[in-house]
Image (tube, rainbow, N blue to C red):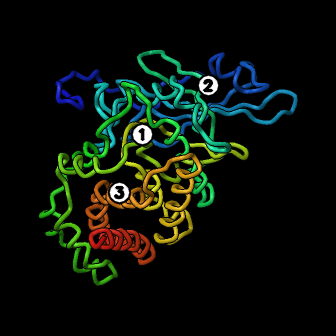
Amino acid sequence: MNSSGQGHPVTEPPQRPRFGPVRQIPPDEVLKGLTGAAADTGWVVDQFGDDGGYPNGGIWQVSADRPNGAGPSSVWVKRTGASYLGDSRVWRCRFASDDPQWWGREAAFYESDLAVSGWPGGVRAARCYAIDDHDECRDLWLESVDVPAPLRVCERAASGLAGWQVAHLDSDRSWLAEDWIPTHVSRYGLDNERTLAHPAWPTAIDRGLDPVLRCVVEVRVTDPAEIRRQLQDFPQVLTHHDFHHANIGTVDEEVVIIDWAFVGWGPIGHDAGHLALDAEADLGASPSEAWHAMQSAYCDGLSAAGWSGDLDLVRRSMVVSNALRLGWTIDHFLSVAEQLSDDTFAAMSARMNFLAGLLELESQS
């Protein structure tokens, strides 16, 4: 049994393994979307990833050489469905449509105008060529994107996302996720006393972890109702909720954002802050550099789109919403700290030390 977002019991269908059979030739709608592609051009199917607990039924790249020397054609296939929810305790999709992690949300996004309208020039969501229902699954045939993105591309993505959010402030879609962050945090099962008692603290502090993080844990908010209350202090916009550099890439000169499985209402600025905190080491920037780059790009994007609200409130939302969401990273860090090399330890602790500093500044404002 599983509970929906509103607590109504529902029965899930049996779960199937990832990477079941996939079409060896793309559907006609896909062929029409790929200039020069044809059904008989020798398509090759390669899977991405492994059989882990991902919240989908597998991702494949389907590719072929275009005729007449026009170059390769390739698309991604992402399998969704009620029988492919994944087994991650936190990221697992849900069967009930009113749950923030309902399995059908990404297809609903691509069936709507939200996927294609409101984007400023040069930034957009990935194209979906076909939604293919077959054998009790739903395959999304998507354009292939060059991921992950470097810092400058991420800045463009943050700015473009801001413009798209402003364009859809009045959106009214029943399938959009609500209450995503409080529900997500609740699924980690955080316990502050347990975290404070973790045996890795002394060694981690000796290696450079800021002791103030213990104070952060002492006051860490884990109650979904209180998280919900604090987030309601900020303007709500359409939020990606999994905005990181591996979900941002390029197609030719355009910046393209993928993985819209959790799209719904969330606090303004949350995605930009999450991008900075989640990926600064991979972006070749310090936590401070990544944070200020994403903050500046995002706020500039809001202003360019005509948003006339308080930008200081946006900056505060970036801090508060991500502090509430990312409290689990302290537990994760402590659980792996003793196995980390000095370089990896330094990079991960720098991120958490930076977040602690942001919280300290926020408490003084």
Residue at the spot x=55%, y=34% of the render?
A: 60
Residue type pointed to by label 2 = Tyr
Q: Which residue is mark 3?
A: 322
Residue corresponding to mark 1: 51
Report the amino acid beneath label 1.
Asp
Query: Residue 356 falls in which quadrant of the image?
Result: bottom left
Residue 264 visible in the snapshot: yes
Q: Which disc number belongs to residue 344? A: none
**Mark 1 vs mark 2, CA separation in Å:** 25 Å
> CB atoms at circles 1 and 2 under 8 Å apart?
no
The residue under label 2 is 129
Query: Which quarter of the image is occupied by the C terminus?
Result: bottom left
Q: Nearer the viewer, mark 1 or mark 2?
A: 2
Q: Earlier in the sequence, mark 3 or mark 2?
A: 2
Provide residue 128's location: percent of width, then percent of height: 58, 28
Left or right, 146 with reference to 320 = right
- Please tell me whether mark 2 sits on a helix, a strand or a loop: strand
Relative placement, left or right, of 113 versus 144 is left
